[in-house]
Amino acid sequence: MFDWMPDNVAPAKDLAQSIRNLTREHNRWFKESIPLIASENVMSPLAREVMNSDLHNRYAEGLPGKRYYQGNIFVDKIESICEDLAKEVFDCEFADVRSTSGTVANMAILTALTKTREKMTTVALSDGGHISHAKIGATGLRGMKTYNYPFDEKNMNIDVEGAKRLIREVRPSVALFGQSVFLFPTPIRELKDAVDEVGCPTWYDGAHVLGLIAGKKFQDPLREGIDVFSASTHKTLPGPQHGIILSDLKREGLETALRRGVFPGVTSNHHLHSVAALAVTLAETREFGAAYADQTIRNAKALAQALYERGMDVLCEHLGFTESHTLIVDVERYHGGAKVAKSLEAANIILNKNLLPWDSDPVKPCGIRIGSQELTRLGMGPKEMVEVAELIARVVVKGEVPERVKDEVIAFKRQFTKVHYCFFEGEEAYDYPYYDGDI
Ligand code: DSN
């Protein structure tokens, strides 16, 4: 031990072993839990294999064939295949797969499309907008002045007439759409007149619904007239934590601006192992994506219906609850989202509290958000959604002690630990290779 190290600091090997043990415990916990966070998923065995490769250790600034480093012979091929697959799956002219996250992709687009102190229109955080669209996030960092679309709380979507008025009045440099709470398609076509009148580019952040769009089961933003489509790649698209930018390049100079926005704009090296994992995910999506997206939406509707029948206030019953993977429940009468999410966590049911448009206190949200995509990936269908709803309702509605429900959650979940809708279907989702023994 170093002489400057106080006696109570553990040796490095013990700390490393602790991290190893905690990681294993995390894996086991998720194997025994019901994962319902709408922004998460499990990667396929093949995606995990390439993710955990030497690609992780390398540099490749620039684009295939135009690099600043040697050693990219195979990297160039992988990245080119990834871009081609993205263009094919999303039926578009342009794909940049170098952003290291959805927020980094958004920062690249802000760099490409805007200048400091310009105006943009966005969905408010309380209405489901993403943090990177807000003043406190990337948009604010760019110095943008943001104006929020009026929101139709009953239908949980942008208020079309109000949004048209706002766009005409503000005359933004860019009109941004897309949410982290995405129940229904954005009325892009309905807003087209106003946007065309102003002449600004339109941008759609489709991170949450990317896998549903890939499976052709949600709106197709580029076909509906959007100029730039950004996303992270690990929510309904079950890929690595990474980002993507797609476009049909209908505006002059867009390709160069977007490429420069990513590099050198907001990234130096991109994450080559993630590009490989994304390429595998896109290939698997081309093969299995339609069935997976269809089942994900069916499961979300089935789960919403089953929760509703058990007395929970699932939003938008009059619209069939949802057209995506997400459902929202108002749990104010059960003491709010924070308390409910915590109680469910004690029963190994993992979801998050969520702000509702009518919440008066942003730190005490009245909602919870639930996503069906990961359970779908693990092979569950409508029958299992009813079982999941019953387990949730026992904790939330009937007030059963969460720790008592937990044993049943574990027994239930142990039947669903394998990945589906991928090559090597049926491999374990939560098992990773280990070295034997302690350090
Ligand atoms: N904050 C994430 C979510 O859970 O929706 C998106 O980045």
Image: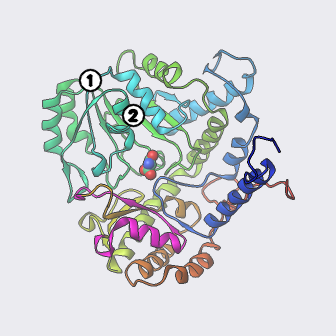
Secondary structure under the numbered disc 1 in the rendered image: loop
On the image, the x and y values in percent for residue 188 come to: 27, 40
Task: Looking at the picture, tell me which residue is in the foreground, 9 or 420.
Answer: 9
On the image, the x and y values in percent for residue 122 come to: 28, 38
Question: Residue at point 36% right, 80% down?
Answer: 310
Q: Quadrant of the N terminus?
A: top right
Distance from mark 1 CB to nearest ligand 1 atom below 8 Å: no
Q: Badge 2 is on which residue?
A: 138
On the image, the x and y values in percent for residue 172 come to: 22, 27
Task: Looking at the picture, tell me which residue is in the foreground, 364 or 234.
Answer: 364
Task: Looking at the picture, tell me which residue is in the foreground, 313 or 138.
Answer: 138
**Circle 1: residue type:** Glu
Q: Which mark is residue 118?
A: 1
Reply yes or no: does residue 53 show up in magenta: no
State the CA–CA distance, disc 1 to disc 2. 14 Å
Question: Residue at point 69% right, 48% down?
Answer: 48
- Residue stretch rendered in magenta on the structure: 332-360
Say whether residue 55 is left or right of residue 402: right
Secondary structure under the numbered disc 2 in the rendered image: helix
**Circle 2: residue type:** Ala
On the image, the x and y values in percent for residue 203 come to: 34, 33
